[in-house]
Amino acid sequence: MAKPAGARWEEEKEIGVIQLRKHQVDQKAAFRKWVGFPARSFVPAEGARALGVSATGSGKTITAAASALECFPGGRILVMVPTLDLIVQSAQSWRRVGHRAPMIAVCSVDKDEVLEQLGVRTTTNPIQLALWAASGPVVVFATYASLVDREDPEDPSGRRTVRGPLEAALAGGERLYGQGMAPFDLAILDEAHMTAGDMGRPWAAIHDNARIPIDFRLYLTATPRILAAPSPQRGQDGRELVIASMQDDSATYGTRIFDLGLAEAVERSILAGFEIDVLEIRDPDPVLGLSEDALRGRRLALLQAALLEHAAQMNLHTVMTFHQRVEEARAFAEQMPATAAELYAAQASAAALAEAEELPASSIDARLYELEDGRHVPPERVWADWLCGDHPVAHRRAVIQRFANGINAQNRRVHRAFLASVRALGVGVDITGLRGVEAVCIVGSRSSQVDVVQNIGRALRPNPDGTVKTARIIIPVLLQHGEDPKDMVASASYQPLVDILQALRSHSERMVDQLASRALTRGTERRRLHVRPAPAAGTEGGDGDETSQAQQEVDRVTSIVVNFAQPRDAADIAALTRCRVIRPQSLVWLEGYQALVRWRTENGITGLHAVPYDVETEVGTTKDYPLGRWVHQQRKALRAGELDSHRKELLDDAGMVWEPGDEAWENKLAALRSYHRAHGHLAPRQDAMWGEGEADGEQLAIGQLLANLRREGGLGKDPERAATRAAQLTAIDEDWNCPWPLDWQRHYRHLAHLAQDEPGGHLPDIAPGVLMDGDDIGRWLQQQRKPGTWKLLSTEQQERLTTLGMQPDQAPSPAPAAPRAAGKGPSKAQQAFQRGLAALAQWVEREGAHRPVPRGHAEEIAVDGEADPVIIKLGVWISNTKSRRDKLDEGQRAALAKLGMQWA
């Protein structure tokens, strides 16, 4: 003979069926530390208060029940919940944990089968409540609605209202015929985020210890609400509003004693991992002129077909859909069988239909069977129903059981089950059974982030048998006619996806922000954007390179994945996350941003490239978007100081050209970087060219460019821009603007490169005639060693050459003065010619014979017998010597010709 439920929970308690998990043990220890020893703990007049945050589906109810049983045995306990369903669910959990005290439910449910089996009496009469729970051990369950004042035309005070039954029973008095209920030792306030906000609301009475006297209040929630009034506001009665907010150390909610967020719960496998599936739905045959109701019905039919296709593709068994209108939920469930029949008939072959008819009737005892992905099932094996807040508790319970166990009203096994909900199953209700909830579909956009997370939580409960589960969060996106999914950054159609990401980010910034910075891809037929959360603190990798299959499965489950039906660039979802989730921008501005990104992609542009003013392009449903004018407006906004810094950052990443010269400058920088990678320096000859496509005129006169940049004002007149450009050049080569000639720098870099491979970094002996990139480095090195040349080098030049192991030659001892023949020596003209010839030789050695000497150039040379260098106006000397070449002797002309003076 089967035992009644009331006896079963006694047996379960005895054998200890409730085994707390690690996080629940930790939370119970935090509770014990908070309450201390209740009989001896000091309790302030407003009561002790604490807040516990634990992810939806992580077992808050069990934790609270176990904590109360340990710290308040025989105590008076109040459990507040928002719905009637949660009263039943909470009572079941508290009995399973082992609470044997009398239980009372303050609710309108009369003669509920489950509550009667649990031994829970129900009432909304404050007199009866005071009689049943006057004193002694008791657990009272109540909804927050029991705090609302009730209408009473016979109220002797004239207010025509009376306090709710819970508050009235605690107050006692004449209206209760002298009856009263003693205060509570502990209150567990579940889904406490629903009590945040205006302290003048009826539900806020639970915070007032004068109205609801309680020694210890524990507020529990998965979605804390942190609120603040931006400015003093007043309610309808003229009083200034007081806001109850759940920030840390709140005067209303107390200190936070434990905090288990959604991301942590997924990483620790307390909850199932999940993936977000975006269903991009387009009407193949749009009909113009439809009424709003007709259009809504057509969209609902498209949603049904898309959801059935997706369920077949992913082989889903149970899918919950959350709607905002009762008529939509009802129509969704009622029309689902007809849509399933159409899809099945369209896909299945005649042979498959014949085989389906031969299947035996599936009974309640038939085992579950699996199908290959992508296959539809006969319509009789597809079940659909709907629930709203107006359905009786017993009806909701029966529908949930059918859904979670895959059984229809005729007790036949079904393969796929769909349950449509309208504000009936969003908060706290556990849906458990043979299957549970594999996927949730959130229809339409959502303004409440709390509701989104609560809805998602329905699917995150782990599988009852302990197998690994990946829940699916399905987001339908209804595309407009002609809309390109690649333009989703600025598309209003993708607002439902934005709502989901914003809600997730409100509870775990790290989970979503990584989509904007570390987007990866996987899969071939379907493009997925994959982010793996960082490992929990204290975890270490294994010793081997291989990862076990179990660990791989854990890694997969604790990942965040966004799936799209069409291939999608990882940059698209990163841009969507940055522009509409992390730092939301207006859709008007985002349309221009999306047009810029798309125009660059379609034209194969990767670097800086200015957008012509008259450019128009297609974006979203706009065929001729004025992109050039939009870009011009952004430049004007930046100059006026009106462009948001985040928008500028986005445009910088998109390759925005802020000034007309920026594009040309970036091209020059790219050429200089390329030249430096090839040669190791930015010291080209003045006539050097660089780049590909000489026949097409695409080569850059890089030698002349460097010469121009090194001149005064060569980087532009704007000091700030000049400093920026100088820093960019220095990042390429810190010696780009060295204080000595580039010819010297080029030869030095050749030698420094050779010295890198030599012992000690010292140069070997290099004879004249050794060429490197056309430069005679041996001859140049020989010239630098000469005492006269060495003396003319700067200290830094000398130090650089010394680092290469080079030392100057010793100056020869001055020869004795030759006796003057017949009392005569070299004439002043001969001395001047020799000095000019020495200066010319020094120029040719440094700059090369191919480079003409400017007329105004002067050269410093060392002259024996002179303490200081002698300045020779070399340009003038060459000009004068050339005009007197007829008067030069043969030896002088030969010397000049040897140095490249062809006119000699």
Image: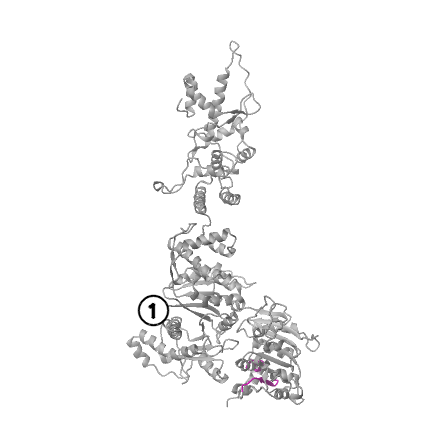
Amino acid type at circle 1 is Pro
In the rendered image, the vertical position of residue 171 relative to residue 581, given as above or below: below
Residue 685 image point, x, y percent: 44, 35
The spot of residue 739 in percent (x, y) is: 52, 35
Which residue is the site of mark 1?
284
Is residue 629 among what the camera can see?
yes
Location of residue 705 (image quadrant): top left
Residues drawn in magenta: 92-109
Rendered position, 851 above or below 145: above
Q: Picture quarter containing residue 130?
A: bottom right
For image coordinates 53% across by 45% down, the residue present is 720
- Decide which of 615, 335 is in the foreground and name it: 615
Q: Which of the 4 image quadrants contains residue 73? A: bottom right
Q: Position of residue 806 (x, y in %)?
A: 52, 32
Q: In front here: 715 or 529? A: 715
Element assignment for label 1: loop
Total numbered labels placed on residues in the image: 1
Please state the horizontal and vertical placement of residue 874, each as a whole percent of the image. Answer: 48, 25
Q: Report the coloring of the rendering.
A: one colour
